[in-house]
């Protein structure tokens, strides 16, 4: 038998070893299947969580005011003192004539509730003007307009408006009737 005619020796064994080694090296290089997909996505998830934490922390610090170097402006507010009461002298005035009443008149005794001592001082300093304005207003009112609770409440609001206009910037809180007589 010549060398050419020699039966070939089986070479399948070495080829199988080479292919197995090649498969093992590719498995080591890139994992395949579900693990490979999760490993790739896990990187993106971790990066996303880190970015959200850093962004949220930065936003929290910014909105908390820690980074602001600007000082807030200070304002001083003077609160008024407790309410002070002042007796208004008795007012007797002829009202505007109305049908059925020839000479109606009103007699009032009142007390003003003022916001603090400074308002009381302003009221006393302008008491002549206040009395004149209240009497002038009463001369424009008719007796039927003063009847009932709505009429006396409207008169009270008118008096508060007149007093506040005169003692401005001080404030009159309310006017209380001690005695009211309409004839």
Image (spheres, rainbow, N blue to C red):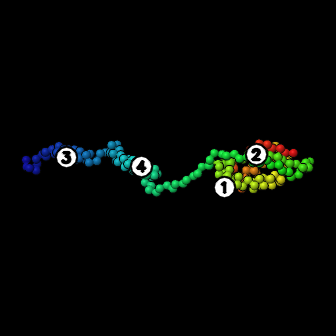
**Residue indicated by mark 4:** 57
Quick one: which residue is furthest to the left in this view? 1
Q: Nearer the viewer, mark 3 or mark 2?
A: 2
Which residue was labeled with disc 2?
110
Residue 178, image x, y percentages: 77, 42
Q: Which mark is residue 18?
A: 3
**In whole angstroms, how far apart are the C-alphas of marks 3 and 2?**
117 Å
**Which marked residue is nearer to the observer: mark 1 or mark 3?**
1
Label 1, secondary structure: give it.
Answer: loop
**Would you call the spot at circle 4 few (<14 residues within 10 Å), some (14-19), or many (20 or more)?**
few
Label 2 close to label 4 by CB (< 8 Å): no
Marks 1 and 4: in contact by CB < 8 Å? no
Dot label at residue 81:
none
- Cα distance, mark 2 to mark 4? 64 Å
Q: Which mark is residue 169?
A: 1
Q: Earlier in the sequence, mark 3 or mark 2?
A: 3
Q: Residue at x 86, y 52 (%)?
A: 96
Q: Quick check: 68 left or right of 143?
A: left
Q: Nearer the viewer, mark 4 or mark 1?
A: 1
Nearer the N terminus, badge 2 or badge 4?
A: 4
Q: Secondary structure at mark 2?
A: strand
What x and y, as percent, mark residue 68? 45, 55
143 sits left or right of 20 in the view: right
Task: Say whether disc 3 or disc 4 marks the residue closer to the N-terminus.
Answer: 3
Q: Nearer the viewer, mark 2 or mark 1?
A: 2
Residue 66 placement, left or right of 85: left
Give the CA separation, mark 4 to mark 1: 49 Å
């Amino acid at each position: 038998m010549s060398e050419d005619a020699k039966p070939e020796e089986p070479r399948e064994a070495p080829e199988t070893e080479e292919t197995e080694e090649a498969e093992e090296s590719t498995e080591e290089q890139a994992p395949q299947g579900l693990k490979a997909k999760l490993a790739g996505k896990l990187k993106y998830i971790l990066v996303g969580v880190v970015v959200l934490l850093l962004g949220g922390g930065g936003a929290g610090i910014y909105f908390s005011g820690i980074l602001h170097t600007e000082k807030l402006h200070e304002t001083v507010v003077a609160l008024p003192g407790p309410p002070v009461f002042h007796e208004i002298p008795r007012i007797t005035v002829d009202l505007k004539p109305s049908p059925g009443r020839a000479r109606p008149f009103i007699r009032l005794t009142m007390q003003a509730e003022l916001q603090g001592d400074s308002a009381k001082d302003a009221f006393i300093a302008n008491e002549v003007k206040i009395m004149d304005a209240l009497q002038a207003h009463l001369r424009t009112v008719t007796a039927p307009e003063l009847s009932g609770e709505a009429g006396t409440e409207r008169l009270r609001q008118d008096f508060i408006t007149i007093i506040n206009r005169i003692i401005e910037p001080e404030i009159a809180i309310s006017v209380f009737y001690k005695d009211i007589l309409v004839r």
